[in-house]
Image: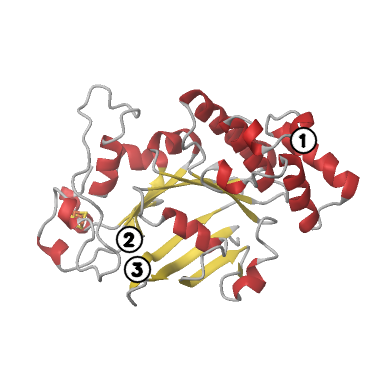
Amino acid sequence: MTALLQVEDLHVWFDLQDGGELHAVQGVSVGVERGERLGLVGESGCGKTTTVLALMGLLPPSASASGRVLLEGTDVLAGGEASMRPHRWSDVAIVFQGAMNALNPVRTIGSQIVEAIELHGEAGGKAARAQTGELLESVGIPAARASRFPHELSGGMRQRAAIAMALSCHPKVLIADEPTTALDVMVQAQILELLDSLCRDFGLALILVTHDLPVVAQLCDHGAVMYAGEIVERGLVDTLYHAPRHPYTRLLFAATPDLGHETEEIVSIPGAPPRLDQPLVGCPFRPRCDSAFEPCATSRPLLRRVADRHAAACHLNDRPSQAPG
Ligand code: SF4
């Protein structure tokens, strides 16, 4: 069966002012099927947001990308903007990080959603306004508030409006980039519940980009852990939590207080990720890894299957008796 969305061997480079290049995404392959929920996790700067911007065709001019982005079997990356445009918002939509960045502050939320509906030929005039009201109601905003400006809404309501806008063209895949950042705990829970119910009601596939593992555990069935521009482990969320096969995944969970570690010592991950404007030799995680051994200094581990629906990029998995976890 053809996958709904499949990203294969995606690379992204940014041109630097000094003439160099920053290799921000290094061979990422991920995918989602209808109704599936994938959490893309990792520390800031690991390439999560760049990956989703690349698959939406929304990279800035200073960036270039290679690889394949297959939407129901059609490569929408190869043909550039002309091949991506018909699918953006209609098939794959994104809720950008920070609702204030996604909404125009000098226009009412209703007019922005109406415009999105009309631009994509979904409906026009009265029908577009009626659809806008329904969309707002579906995300928990009374239709009468369509005439409000973003600054007249609370942070949670603005995030709901941004989600309504992303859903305006009935996408099959919704990407949510750090959807709960800067919201208080109660509102975070409400937004997660909303995403959960929208995915169920509309049969959406979800790609959730976050550094927040409890959010992934709550909402996603699969997870892909990114480090230094590449996926270092992927599998079912339960498997990643209970049986990680990469030391970075193990440390990420250990550094998260809300996932059943109440009785264990919470650890922070020492050191910092490597610079991506220089070639990486050996395992990118080696300077921070407490399990590193000889091959890690010279040989870059490849992401490979370690169990059913579970892959990791760590040399320890070549020595099964010493596999991390
Ligand atoms: Fe650690 Fe080596 Fe595995 Fe990298 S390959 S995560 S350095 S054990």
* Looking at the image, residue 228 lies above or below residue 213: below
Q: Toward which corner of the image does residue 325 lie, by quadrant?
A: top left
Q: Earlier in the sequence, mark 2 or mark 3?
A: 3
Residue 90 in percent (x, y) is at 70, 56
Label 3 CB, ligand 1: below 8 Å?
no
Q: Amino acid at mark 2?
A: Leu
Residue 195 in percent (x, y) is at 59, 36
Most extreme residue toward the front is 106
Q: Is residue 143 left or right of residue 187?
A: right
**Which element carries disc 3, helix, strand or loop?**
strand
Q: What residue lies at 25% left-to-right and 41% top-to-bottom?
A: 251
Q: Are marks 2 and 3 in contact (CB under 8 Å)?
A: no
Q: Earlier in the sequence, mark 1 or mark 3?
A: 3
Query: Where is mark 1, residue-wise?
Result: 147
Q: Amino acid at mark 1?
A: Ser
Query: Where is mark 3, residue-wise?
Result: 22
Quarter of the image with the N terminus is: bottom right
Q: Neighbour class for label 2 at 10 Å: few (<14), some, many (≥20)?
A: some
Q: What residue lies at 27% left-to-right and 23% top-to-bottom?
A: 262
In three-dimensional space, the C-alpha distance between marks 1 and 3, rounded to whole angstroms, equals: 43 Å
Residue 165 at least partly seen = yes
Query: Where is mark 2, residue-wise?
Result: 303
Q: Neighbour class for label 3 at 10 Å: few (<14), some, many (≥20)?
A: some
Q: Amino acid at mark 3?
A: Leu
For the residues carrying marks 1 and 2, which lies nearer the camera in this image?
Answer: 1
Q: Quadrant of ligand 1?
A: bottom left
Disc count in the image?
A: 3
- Front residue of this view, candidates 61 and 278: 61
In three-dimensional space, the C-alpha distance between marks 1 and 2, rounded to whole angstroms, equals: 50 Å
For the residues carrying marks 2 and 3, which lies nearer the camera in this image?
Answer: 3
